[in-house]
Amino acid sequence: MSQQQHSVAANATQDLAIKPSINTLAQGSMFWQPDYREASPWLEHLPFLFWLVEALRPQQAVGLGVESVAHFAVCQSASRLRLGTRCFMVGVHEEDAASKQDAEAIRAYAADHFSTISQWLEATPIRAIDQFDEGSIDLLLLHVEADDNSVDYLLDRWLSKLSTQGVVVVPGVARREPGCLVFRAFETLKARYPHFVFHHAGGLGIIAVGNNLPPLLKNLLGALESAASTQVVQDVFARLGRSCQDKVTVRHQQALSQALETRVNEQASNLAAAEQRVNEQEEHLQQVGEERDKLKACLEQQESRFAQERGRLAERVSSLEEFNDELKKELMRQREQGERQANEAREQRERYAAESREYAQALKASEQALNKAQQEVDEYKRTLETRFSELAKLTSLLEANEKSLRSAHEENTGLTNKLQKAESSLQARFNEMGQLTRKLQEAEQRIGDAEKSRSDVEQQLAQQKKGYATLSAQLKATTEREKEALSTVDELTEQLKKNEAQRGQLKRELDDTKSANQKLEVDAKANRETQAQQRREIERQSHELANLVDQLEALRAAAPSTDTSTQAELTAPKSVAKAPPLTKRAIKRQVALIEASQWFDAKWYLAQYPDIARDSKMSANPARHYLLMGGFEGRNPSPGFDSAYYLQHNPDVVESGINPLVHYLKFGEKEQRSTNAKY
């Protein structure tokens, strides 16, 4: 301990020699922990509120404003001390959904824990005044908004309802922000009534309106006579209150940590699902790529085959052109020969005019047939040129087509076979034309058969026209199939593009998910660091509180007015009952029963309660002290037996006045009653 702290302790010892100190205020209730913890301006003032209820022991407590934390703290104190206090909360909740939900939660908690002592008056503080008698309220908790300018009016109306030991508690008196008006009303009351002020957590003002105050409350107000005493009292309750706030903060941080862990787990599962989808898409894309490679190889094969087919078609075209030229020459030769035959026939007709008139007419008819045949040959030539142009277009289309299917090759192969058949057919027609030539040469001998030969030629030409029409239809069908093949290739290309775009989108989603997970991990790490800092801060505050308790014990040892009962009050949790009068024989018998019990540990008892160890009379027989005083003060005979817990959960033991351990050894153990909260 530093020199400055020794100096402060020395000054405090001098002040405590003539003025009240924290020793005269110590009660077990100031170390209680609230069962109901929520964010509230009252949270850090609950240790003092517990102390005030035990010191004041009010019969009726009223809280103005909907403040569940302070209300349930008063209810907890009254229930634990078995005071029979009537606790009222006066106020109207808001009409929004969140306020209604909070109100339902408050009613449910009150019904579950304090249904016999708690009541909520859903009315404004002004309208609820007439529901209370004059001088009937011992404790008034004023919870109003910081900017409420009706505080003076409320206090003036409610002060008449306070009893002779009435106390008013006002939070927020240390706030000085613009718009805060509560401290103005408190300053006005300070000039009229005794008071005490805490400055931590927004401040808390205590106004003693009654003139018949309990001794502990008088000691609290008397602490103002010494600055050191005032500072010690304020520091003790500030540190005790900070532990309540720290526990709420830790609970919120744990809830936040659990929420973050839940989100991390969800994101991890989403990431796993996304990775699985990506893997599936990659497999699908790999399959599509393999199919694309196969299709590309197939198209390359088709392209090479089409190149070969184009070469073959070019050869066929050149062959057809040569055949057309030969056919043209043959027709010209046949025409010249026909003309010569006609001239010869004409000469013969002149010679045999009279005899061969009919022959001349037949020859003329034959000439007309030849002319008609020539016209048909010309028409065939034009048709063949048209087919050649179509064939040239087909060749250019085949050159532009780089992605055809195997079916087109098969169809083109069939077309090639058909073209070969057509060549064979044309060759056959050429042979037939040769036969026709021979027939024309025999025309002189068989003029009568000319018409028959002409009809044969016409039939042969008609058959040739049909063959070329079939060939044109086949070429047209092949063109349509090639167009369909091109459209199929385009569709496959579009599908590949869509797959690539989808793969890119999945990769972006995966990157976003990874970045979100990294951010969540950073938040979780920061949260864990914050929790570690809070734990270190709580440990530091615990050490400071232990040092402060050591200072209080030093002050208590230095104060001449400190007696044994006051020292017991500093360390004992609280007095829960009084020992009944016992004879010396009964005391001796029950002391022997306690000492022989496994539930009493004398060394542990003296180490746990140093105030008893320092007293030579009490430390000489710790079992006797526990029998007559310790058990009723809430002291434990060993770590396994909780005296306060046993009395709290067994009201019949309290009414009987028997020491809790003695009752357990005689009756409770057989009845299988619990010795502490763990069993």
Image (cartoon, grey):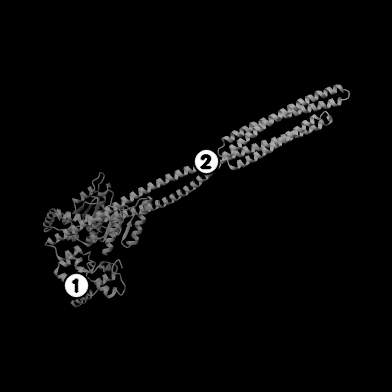
Number of marks in the image?
A: 2
- Left or right for 456, reference 668: right
Query: Tag 2, which secondary structure?
Result: helix
State the residue lying farthest toward the bottom: 585
Closer to us: 390 or 158: 390
Above or below for 604 versus 235: below
The answer to whether mark 1 and mark 2 are in CB contact below 8 A is: no
Quarter of the picture containing the C terminus is bottom left
Closer to us: 82 or 415: 415
Location of residue 418 in the rendering, given as x and y in whole percent from the top left corner: 67, 39
Sequence-earlier tag: 1 or 2? 2
Location of residue 446 in the rendering, given as x and y in whole percent from the top left corner: 83, 30
Q: Which residue is mark 1?
A: 624
Q: Which of the two discs, 1 and 2, sits closer to the camera?
A: 2
Label 2 Cα crowd, 10 Å radius (few <14 / some 14-19 / many 20+) = few
Label 1 Cα crowd, 10 Å radius (few <14 / some 14-19 / many 20+) = some
**Residue at point 75% right, 29% down?**
373
Q: Which residue is mark 2?
A: 493
Q: Amino acid at mark 1?
A: Arg
Q: Amino acid at mark 2?
A: Thr
Location of residue 270 in the rendering, given as x and y in whole percent from the top left corner: 42, 51
Judge whether residue 378 can be spotted in this image.
Answer: no
Query: Tag 1, which secondary structure?
Result: helix
Closer to us: 322 or 521: 322
Quarter of the picture containing the N terminus is bottom left
State the residue lying farthest toward the right: 354
Judge whether residue 70 can be spotted in this image.
Answer: yes
Task: Calculate the distance from the C-alpha at mark 1 to the C-alpha at mark 2.
Answer: 99 Å
Closer to us: 194 or 350: 350
Q: Which mark is residue 248?
A: none
- Left or right for 426, reference 100: right
Location of residue 31 in the rendering, given as x and y in whole percent from the top left corner: 23, 60
